[in-house]
Image (cartoon, coloured by chain):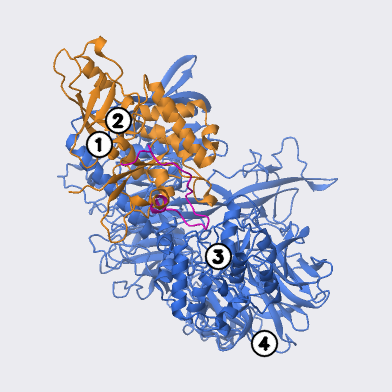
Amino acid sequence: MPASRLWVVDVYGRVFSLSTAGQQWEQCRDAQMEFKRVTAAQQCCWGIACDNNVYLNVHASDLPIRYQEETYENQRWNPIGGFSDHLLPSDRWQWSDITGLKHQPLDSFELPSSSWEWEGDWYVDENFEGEPTEKEGWTYAIDFPAFYTKNKKMTSCVRRRRWLRYRRYKDMDTWAKIPSPQMETPDPFSDISCGGWEISEEPRGRLSLWAVSLLGKVWFRVGIYHHNPEGSMWEEVSVPGEVLQISCGPGDLVWAVLWEGQLIVRQGITRDCSKGTSWVEVESPSPDVGATHVAVGINTVWALTKDNKVWFRRGVDSHNPCGLGWISMVGEMITINVGLNDQVFAIGCEDRAVYFRQGVTTSELSGKTWKAISVPRDGDRSHSSASTNSLQSAGCFFSGEVRAQSVVSDVELDTEKVSTDGASCLVTSTSPESVVDAPTDNPDQPIETPKPRIPKVTSDSFISELISDREPAKTLREGGSAGPAVPEEEETLPSEGEVKALSALDAADTSSLSSVATYTLAMEDPYGTDEHPLWAWVSGGGCSVDSHSHLNWFNSVNTSSLVGSVQSMSLSVTSAQTAAWRQQIFEQLTERTKREMDNFKHYEQAIEQSVWVKKGTMQWWRDWKPYKWIDVHFALEQFSGPEGNKDGILFIYYNFYEEKKYLHAFVNELTILVPVLNESKHTFAIYTPERTKQRFPIRLAAATELEMHDWVCMDTSQHSQRKSFYYHRLALLSVSCWDIFVSEPSPALEAMPYPTPCDQMFWRQVGGHLRMVECNTVGIVWGIGYDHTAWVYTGGYGGGFFQGLASSTDNIYTQTDVKSVYIYENQRWNPLEGFTNRGLPTDRYMWSDASGLHECTKTNMKPPSTQWTWVSDWAIDYSVSGGTDKEGWQYAADFPVSYHGRKGKTDFVRRKRWKCKLTTTGPWQEIPPIALSDVTILPCTAQSNVDEVPLWAISNKGDVLCRLGVTALTPAGSSWLHVGTDQPFKSISIGAASQVWAIARDGSAFYRGSVSPQSPAGDCWYHIPSPSKQKLRQVSVGRTSVLTVDENGNLWYRQGVTPSYPQGSSWEHISNNVRKVSVGPLDQVWIIADKVQGSHSLSCGTVCHRLGVQPVEPKGILWDYGIGGGWDHITVRGNSMEPPRVRLPSLTDASAPAPRSPIPFRNMEVNSSAGDS
Amino acid sequence: MADDKDVLRDVWFGRIPTSFTLNQDEVTEREAEPYYLLLPRVSYLTLVTDKVKKHFLKVMRAEDVEEMWFEYEGTPLKWHYPIGVLFDLHASNTVLPWSITVHFKNFPDSDLLHCPSSSVVEAHFMSSIKEADALKHKSQVVNDMQKKDHKQLWMGLQNDKFDQFWAMNRKLMEYPTEEGGFRYIPFRIYQTMSDRPFIQRLFRPVSPEGNVHTLGDLMKEMDPAALPNDGEPKRYQVVIHGIEPLLETPLQWLSEHLSHPDNFLHICVIPTPTD
């Protein structure tokens, strides 16, 4: 989890923040002044200071905020002086923008504010559409506006060149004043709220910022984008009355409270109109008492009324932003705020503590209970008592132990109990009702707790009233849980000795729901009343938590004698502690096995091992034409030895023209068993070497998903020699349908001239879900998910797919990834009604998949497997190739035709997009916060564990990054170093000698000069022309070889690369139909091949190995085909196992052992008749 | 859910080398050789001793044979306790192989249950599983299973099929995440020096305050004498499957991983060996 932050302001205007990973409030030290309000997003925090100015605090990131300014210098040729800046009167400006319409000389560019600085001076761009230009960067044309080329011709009368300059936002992590011309905002702001980052697909940084002025006017900040975090100007938004407060959610919800107590809801907020169009009024939750405060999230609205009551709005979503009705919630709050994931934070009315709403989930947005956040401030005296420290380090489970430090919310403990017993959960420590609700179900409650400790008088009459009519024990607990009571206790603060005695007394009381903790607290907070944190404002917009987050915010001092054991008891204790007892058990079991069995292996087993036969029915993708699914019986016969090592045979019985036949496969020969995603069936493919050769695996469909997973697990555990199953060297990795597989290499794999044929490689699943993985020989493995999150491999195995049985416990983490599912809404035009969903009888379904062949409605779409859950509602997807109109429609003449974004003809189709999110577990740990699109690791050999390993990556915005601090021991590294580029990049690779190659988004190649251990980021980029007329897509660099793949699937080899001239001289074509290439540290070449003939869609993405690669023949000779079946990515960069030296026979023999024809098409006999029965 | 396969396999494949010797009082036609076997710790004596019976019957006359029973150093061995429990309770810290005496007459009716066939073991085993699930899930999981699922559990045990057994047993080890564990932990605490056969009471995996209960908490509540006092040498060992887990091991985890196939956590409290 990235360490996101919860922001608060205390009653003195000091700004604090609390990290989701942290345990103390950290004061924002650089705030020179007091703040009234703050509103946070994940990347920044806005605030209104006491000088009534708006300030922005952009959080520092390894990726700088840079903006590229550009201007064009235009020249015309004249016979006298050649090209000069003397232009014709009708020409464009000598310095202009790309269109020529706007005059922009170099000195007209100014920094937008004092928060920006120039990175350097202006320079000429010498790259033209992926091709390097002459030194001066001129491009030539016959006349302005015309087609430019980089070559000067006889007809070239005009030329232009592009000048570039970068500016960088420098005021990171400080409060920078937003310049506010008097004209824009006549009266000072009193409230501010940001949100709206989810209404469009813009990169993070786009925000909607709303503000309210003292006179009740509403303002909207225009133009806040990633490259312009400050926005450009304030625009007034007319409102039906005077607004008191406003709240903007991450999506399209914006609510405001009027002075009169009603609420208004902004309508018409869309992707194109983040400001919305109009307001709709909603009545106050309570007819007599007006609303004072509102807080909105994505699908949730909370409000407070003047009497501090809390209200939840029922039925709110983006289709119905107004919701249906108010529900009264428990608690008395003065401020409320909705953060990410609709999580709710509030500040208690009485105690001014920050409360977190526990149990808020998408299905239960109103949550369960309020829980006070209780952590010290960084300025507070450190709580050095041993118990405190140990307890905090124990990392209590979120829903478990709750001990408020300043506010002992013992009622929460009851709450826990109540909820486990299934009774009412709506119990809070702040609300008086809750006390009444909370059952005193523990008869041996601390009735004997010393009575003199009861705070007799409190500042709050309500509390004293409460105390007076409760039984003593209860009163005490209540006194403890209500904040204002604490100052009273300060007066009767017992001496140190007394407290100890008291603690001891309490320690004896093991039944302890006791609240004597309060007194210890009093002792531990030496600052007295005014130092007690009293909060005034909270903002959770930058705080990434959900109901499952593990937070350490609620720990505090626990005086009971159980403290010692509490820390080691919690199931969610840190892995080190887990390891302690688990390790001990495992070691003892191993020792026991040794003791009791090692000397007695010759003894007979009491239970004879017999054959276990599993029988059942499945569906089988028939081996002969016409291919279809047929019902088959299967039998899996397994024989296992005493140690559980197994062998088995899988039989599949089928009918062939009324004749009973079967095919079989030996379990030990199965090389890989892959789940194949299929909308309607739970299918998987079984490969054997023979089947791989035929490129026709056994495809089976199980009746249920669970059954399919059982099969996949079955196979995985067959091959795994237990305990040697840890992949210390993930050598060959492939990614298919998001699952990650590994094959452990043998020296023979790259042997010359007889390598192990690919089809005999065994593959195993690693667990997790990634789009790509990269590794190196010391075992550093990084992966990138479909949502561009970066992950590092932790060394474990297993996770979700193992169904909890076959995996290790250590190093398995929750992993999430996001995948988009698309369905299409189709309409046909008719003369009467225009476009309707009434199609012709021959038409496709009105709701369909992309092909139109399958009906897909919003309601009948299911997540691909139970590991997936939907995370968003259906939304229109505008980023469809071909473009769309404003409503997302794409038009075409008839259905299966290419679509375009503007209506011209008669028919149209529109697509809607649904995102779905996968939550699984795997041995991967997230590397926040920068999203990546590519990564590469130096494929080093023989290095010590502490040497830094160069790792380069490309962010999903195209920035080139260099990771610092990556070693075999710390594979995650420490921080990113940004490497400047003139354009966004998309692929990068580093070779064994630190040669870094990269591909820019325009398809041109770059070589990074002078990269060395001393200068890990190198010094400059050398532009390498791409193969003629080809745009490159991907690059991979091995020991010396440099290979690239272009957009058309061609594989290119860089000729002439020498140590003194690492850029090489030219590109040489190797092959086509290549999807991905990976060059290993031995210069071995492996690819994912496209369109290999074989069994339908399965063969798309086949693993292939280049044979005959050797120093004299670095391009190799021919391809050896491995497993097919939708593979997306391969990396061989972890395999540096030198092949055994064999005397080379003549080259003609070399091709004999693997008689395979070169890519792409191979004539092969797909078994068109019966299977291999 | 039980998710530590390494531990589960070690528990399942635990074996005790045993030598079976015919009781000297038995009438034999010729001298009976001892019989050596590796007994699965998680199984039951009468389930895995068919070979023993066959071996000794070869030297005996049919009319001298009554129901077979076992004895170790004078203690009749209760077949309805798992073998590992019998060994830990009576014979741990002794020299291996475990030397069991085989009897064919004078069945001690007061000490042992009769076990005429393996179906009795099956009934006992299944009733234990059902009892355990009543504690863990109010019997909901075991009642949702079909007859063949029950059979799979039993066959898994009978034929020593780890995967077959656990493919089904994992359902019995699930629990709602928000509850943090089973309703109650099915456990039995055996003491050598006690008259009671074992201690079995209701005990939750998580305290009302939300704290996770550990093995130490359980022992403190059920058998405080088994825990060492401060400063004193340890008098008792708390043994599960022949090992002594740390007292801070979470009970829920133990229940998921160190329970016997009958789904009970069998805990033996035995005196610390003096040597």
* Residue at 36% across, 65% down: A951
> Residue under circle 1?
A1152
Closer to the chain start, of discs 4 and 3, is 4
Q: Which chain is orange?
A: B
Q: Amino acid at mark 1?
A: Ala
**Few, some or many C-alpha atoms within 10 Å of disc 1 (few <14, some 14-19, many ≥20)?**
few
Residues at discs 2 and 4 in contact (Cβ within 8 Å): no
Q: CA distance from mark 2 to mark 1?
A: 68 Å
Q: Is residue A1131 visible?
A: no
- Which residues lie in the magenta part? B193-218
Q: Chain A, which colour?
A: blue
> Residue under circle 4?
A52
Let me know if residue B206 is in the magenta part. Answer: yes
Q: CA distance from mark 3 to mark 2?
A: 59 Å
The C terminus of chain A, quarter of image: top left
> Residue under circle 2?
B77
Q: Amino acid at mark 4?
A: Asn
Closer to the chain start, of discs 1 and 3, is 3
Q: Chain of mark 1?
A: A
Mark 2 element type: loop
Q: Are marks 2 and 4 on the same chain?
A: no
